[in-house]
Amino acid sequence: MSIEDLINKEFPLDESIYYLNHAAVSPWPQRTADAVCQFANENTRLGAANYLVWLEKEAELRQQLKRLINAPSVDDISLLKNTSEALSVVAEGIDWQSGDNIVSSDEEFPSNRLPWLAQAINGVEFKEISLSNGTSPEAALIDACDDKTRVLTISSVQYGTGKCHNLTMLGEYCHANNILFCVDAIQSLGALPFDCQAIKADFVMADAHKWMLGPEGIAIFYCKAEIRNLLNLHQFGWHMVKDVGNYDSKDSNYAETGRRFECGSPNMLGIHALSASLSLIEEVGIENVSANIINNISYLIDLLRNIPELTFISPTTKPHYAGIVTFTIEGINIPELYSKLMKNKLICANRAGGIRFSPHFYTSRKTIYNSLEILSLYI
């Protein structure tokens, strides 16, 4: 089946809407909706009679996520609720010393800010660096590090401005200087190829509901094997112990794998849904997904350049952009414009002081062109 035929089959979006908001929440593929319905029907008829089969699906998902980020082992993969929980596991797990600091940017989503700010109680400074300083965003972050820096934490792609970072450069610097490297990858997993080993990441986390085309309530957390046992645990439950399933055991020996961060019952509904979504990404191929997204962004940028008084907030040259284009227009009230676009079924976002468009790989040129036609009515 061609990619075009697959797209038509998997994305029967309502023809009345123009969906350019995958950096927020993505529509599910048809196979994901089917998987959820099948799981719900099975629960209705059989309860948990097939729980052992569900565990096989959980194992399959871990393998899919391992491949998605090129983790060394499936044991490095934890299934958590969301990016915020994963970031909190790291921020609360590090054995901080008073005087330590954390380096990040001033463009982070609150999930990658609040857990680190909370470490002020331990005497830890959180440095929010302007990415406009220095010769590049990466140089600005590196220049802010010193001998007290314990963690450099950054989004792979900024949610508002769409800046795509050189993670290899940052990871190599952190590795060479004994700094932990933490990547919030929610705006790139499922959209761009990602290799946690190549970028020397210590931690990677991302929700499923954006570019991975999955549901809310389930997320990947990668922790490098060598440092897994160094994170102090602050959540506890039956699922995280080494001898899981032995409910009579009085031992509290925690799993050596990433399961040590999964304190309670797994989100089986989310597991079935995300596995279905990732099966589509694997069928299309992440390289093809990425190429389509970049081509869509390039086309969108070219169309937007024709609008007088428009200023791009996002980068407009490769390889500095991913799936996000954010812009503002002189003399236009952005919140009012956003409201008008949404009322006309152009699904987008108001971020970083501008309008944010974020098409996925399956988004058609027609959808993008018609979206610009709607935009032109109000400027």
Image (cartoon, rainbow, N blue to C red):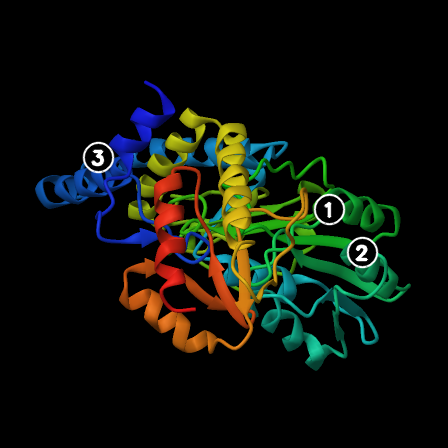
Using the numbered discs, state the Cα–Cα distance from disc 3 to disc 1 in whole angstroms.
44 Å
Mark sitting earlier along the chain (1/2): 2
Using the numbered discs, state the Cα–Cα distance from disc 1 to disc 2 in whole angstroms.
10 Å
The disc labelled 2 sits on which kind of residue?
Ser
- Are the residues tagged 1 and 2 within 8 Å (C-beta)? yes
Residue on which the image places disc 1 = 166
Residue found farthest to the right: 147
The disc labelled 1 sits on which kind of residue?
Asn
Residue found farthest to the top: 1
Residue 123 higher or lower than 252, as above or below: below
Q: Residues within 10 Å of mark 3 (few under 14, many from 20)?
A: few
Q: Nearer the viewer, mark 3 or mark 2?
A: 2
Splitting the image into 4 quarters, where does residue 4 fall?
top left
Task: Determine the secondary structure under disc 2.
Answer: loop
Q: Nearer the viewer, mark 1 or mark 2?
A: 2
The disc labelled 3 sits on which kind of residue?
Asn
The percent position of residue 377, horizontal first and vertical second, equals 36, 64
The residue depicted at 34 percent of the width and 50 percent of the height is 370
Q: Residues within 10 Å of mark 1 (few under 14, many from 20)?
A: some
Mark sitting earlier along the chain (3/2): 3
- Are the residues tagged 3 and 1 within 8 Å (C-beta)? no
Q: Nearer the viewer, mark 3 or mark 1?
A: 1
- Are the residues tagged 3 and 2 within 8 Å (C-beta)? no
Residue on which the image places disc 2 = 136
Splitting the image into 4 quarters, where does residue 147 fall?
bottom right
Residue on which the image places disc 3 = 50
Residue 142 visible (yes or no): yes
Q: Nearer the viewer, residue 61 or 207?
A: 207
The C terminus sits in image quarter: bottom left
Splitting the image into 4 quarters, where does residue 179 fall?
bottom right
The percent position of residue 288, horizontal first and vertical second, equals 50, 28
